[in-house]
Amino acid sequence: MNYTEALKHKKESEKNADASVADLFHIVITPANTDESAKFIEDFLKSPESFDDESCKKYCSDDEYEVVSFKKENDDH
């Protein structure tokens, strides 16, 4: 999907997720390309607060995106 479609999908996912999902998982837009997505997620995990929805654009070469969720790192341990 293109960026606009991915953004809409992300907002719907966040709206439909219950609070525990929002607390435990990152919901992010990533490039659909596996290598680009892996690099984006690697960098994202180093500093999640410095990324916004549009951050994925600089990692993407073909304007194809997907919305993914993955478990947040637990800072308590």
Image (cartoon, rainbow, N blue to C red):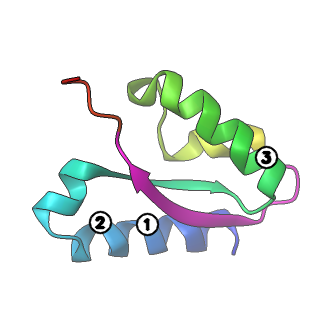
Q: Nearer the viewer, mark 1 or mark 3?
A: 3
Q: Nearest the camera: 55 or 45?
A: 45
Q: Which mark is residue 10?
A: 1
Q: Are marks 3 and 2 in contact (CB under 8 Å)?
A: no
Q: Where's the C terminus, which quadrant? A: top left
Q: Residues within 10 Å of mark 1 (few under 14, many from 20)?
A: many
**Residue position marked by numbered label 3 in the rendering:** 36
Amino acid type shown at disc 3: Glu
- Position of residue 65 relative to residue 54, above or below, is below
Q: 19 or 11: which is nearer to us? A: 19
Q: Nearer the viewer, mark 3 or mark 2?
A: 3
Q: Looking at the image, which residue sits at the far front?
A: 77
Question: Magenta stretch?
Answer: 60-72
**Residue 11: in sight, yes or no?**
yes
Q: Based on the displayed image, in which of its 4 quarters is residue 73 positioned?
A: top left
- Residue 60 appears in the rendering: no
Q: Are marks 2 and 1 in contact (CB under 8 Å)?
A: yes
Residue at figure coordinates x 82%, y 48% from the top left: 35
Q: Secondary structure at mark 2?
A: helix
Residue 7 placement, left or right of 59 = left
Q: Quadrant of the N terminus?
A: bottom right
Spot occupied by residue 15 in the image (x, y as percentages of width and height): 24, 71
| Relative to 29, residue 10 above or below | below
Q: Is residue 52 left or right of residue 32?
A: left
Residue plotted at (22% across, 61% down): 21
Q: CA distance from mark 2 to mark 1?
A: 6 Å
Residue 50 is inside the magenta segment:
no
| Image disc number at residue 14 | 2
Q: Closer to the N terminus: mark 1 or mark 3?
A: 1
> What residue is shown at x 55% (from left), y 56% (from top)?
29
- Indicate the amino acid at tag 1: Lys
Label 3 Cα neighbours within 10 Å, binned few <14 / some 14-19 / many ≥20: some
